Image (spheres, helix red, strand yellow):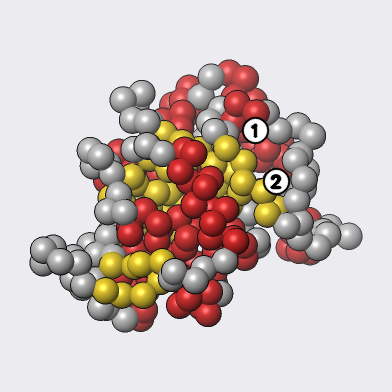
């Protein structure tokens, strides 16, 4: 991943731009993967907000993160990068473009156990090198319990979308959660989406693009972050999908689906079952 990053990005001086002395420039000898990303991105621009919804264990998706951020930065279009992978309130805005990875991780209070730096560091450092702020956007853990009790969150989605979100919570937890936990867990999901949306609104700049890096569930137009963004913003929601289309996927949920190679089959519920003591 870091090898790919170093091939994609080099630091150069921007003439006449003293506030941004360094910026990523794409290597002239890049391959077909970057060309594909460039074509896909061009088809979606212009936009005020670009939502990149990944599958967290697909390394190709994190490589696309770096490519998109580098392309936008090279064109002078990148306003900020917001992260599900860091809590709201942290930022790299005070860092110099030449800051180290350790300084960047400290600024973002990075949790490597939850989000491996080797996966997301290249995209983050692309923005830092460009002098573009990287912002935490996720709901802090300390705020989750109060949100579980906040019934006002139940009214933040249309009825069908709320039921669909609740069903995703069931499926996402391998149908092992007690039914009494479905509503509180759904409220946390909605609160996370609202936190990310608020971060994007604050970071938006006319004529530039704010990018959100998150799981694909957060970028779903029907029930995710777009539900909480003002209509005045031009939003493009992308699903990065490993393998073939899901049978139940709705076309209107995303503006584009960028397919990547399928991953090896994996029982995602095995670890969760072990945690729950279920055989």
**Tag 1 residue:** 166
Name of the residue lying farthest toward the top: 159
Image quarter where the N terminus lies is: bottom right
Quadrant hosting residue 113: bottom right
Q: Nearer the viewer, residue 87 or 44?
A: 44
Image quarter where the C terminus lies is: bottom right
Say which element carries label 2: helix
Q: Residue visible at 41% across and 39% down?
A: 45
Within 10 angstroms of label 1, few (less than 14), some, or many (20 or more) residues? Answer: some
Mark before the other along the chain sequence, 2 or 1: 1
Within 10 angstroms of label 2, few (less than 14), some, or many (20 or more) residues? Answer: few
Question: Residue 172 shows which numbered tag?
Answer: 2
Quadrant hosting residue 262: bottom right
Q: Residue visible at 60% across and 26% down?
A: 252
Q: Is residue 219 above or below residue 18?
A: above
Quadrant hosting residue 101: bottom left
Name of the residue lying farthest toward the right: 279
Q: Nearer the viewer, residue 255 or 186?
A: 255
Q: Is residue 15 above or below residue 269?
A: below
Could you tell me if residue 85 is visible in this image? yes
Q: Position of residue 71 (x, y in %)?
A: 40, 57
């Amino acid at each position: 991943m870091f090898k790919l990053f170093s091939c994609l990005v080099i630091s150069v001086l921007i003439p006449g731009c003293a506030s941004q002395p360094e910026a990523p420039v794409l290597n002239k000898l890049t391959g077909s993967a970057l060309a594909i990303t460039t074509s896909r991105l061009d088809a979606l621009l212009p936009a005020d907000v670009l939502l990149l919804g990944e599958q967290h264990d697909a390394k190709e998706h994190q490589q696309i993160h770096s490519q998109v951020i580098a392309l936008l930065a090279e064109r002078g279009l990148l306003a900020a990068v917001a992260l599900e992978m860091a809590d709201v309130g942290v930022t790299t805005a005070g860092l110099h473009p030449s800051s180290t990875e350790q300084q960047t991780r400290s600024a973002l209070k990075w949790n490597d156990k939850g989000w491996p730096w080797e996966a997301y560091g290249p995209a983050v450092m692309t923005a830092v090198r460009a002098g573009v702020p990287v912002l935490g956007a996720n709901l802090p853990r300390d705020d989750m319990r109060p949100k579980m009790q906040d019934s006002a969150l139940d009214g933040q989605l249309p009825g069908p979308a709320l039921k669909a979100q609740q069903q995703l919570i069931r499926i996402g937890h391998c149908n092992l959660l007690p039914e009494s936990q479905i509503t509180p867990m759904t409220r946390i999901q909605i609160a996370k989406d609202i936190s990310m949306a608020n971060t994007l609104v604050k970071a938006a700049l006319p004529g530039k693009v704010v990018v959100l890096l998150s799981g694909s569930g957060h970028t779903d137009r029907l029930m995710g972050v777009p539900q909480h963004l003002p209509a005045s913003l031009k939003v493009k929601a992308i699903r990065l999908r490993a393998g073939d289309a899901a049978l139940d996927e709705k076309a209107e949920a995303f503006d584009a689906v960028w397919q990547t190679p399928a991953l090896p089959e994996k029982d995602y519920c095995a670890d969760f079952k072990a945690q729950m003591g279920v055989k």
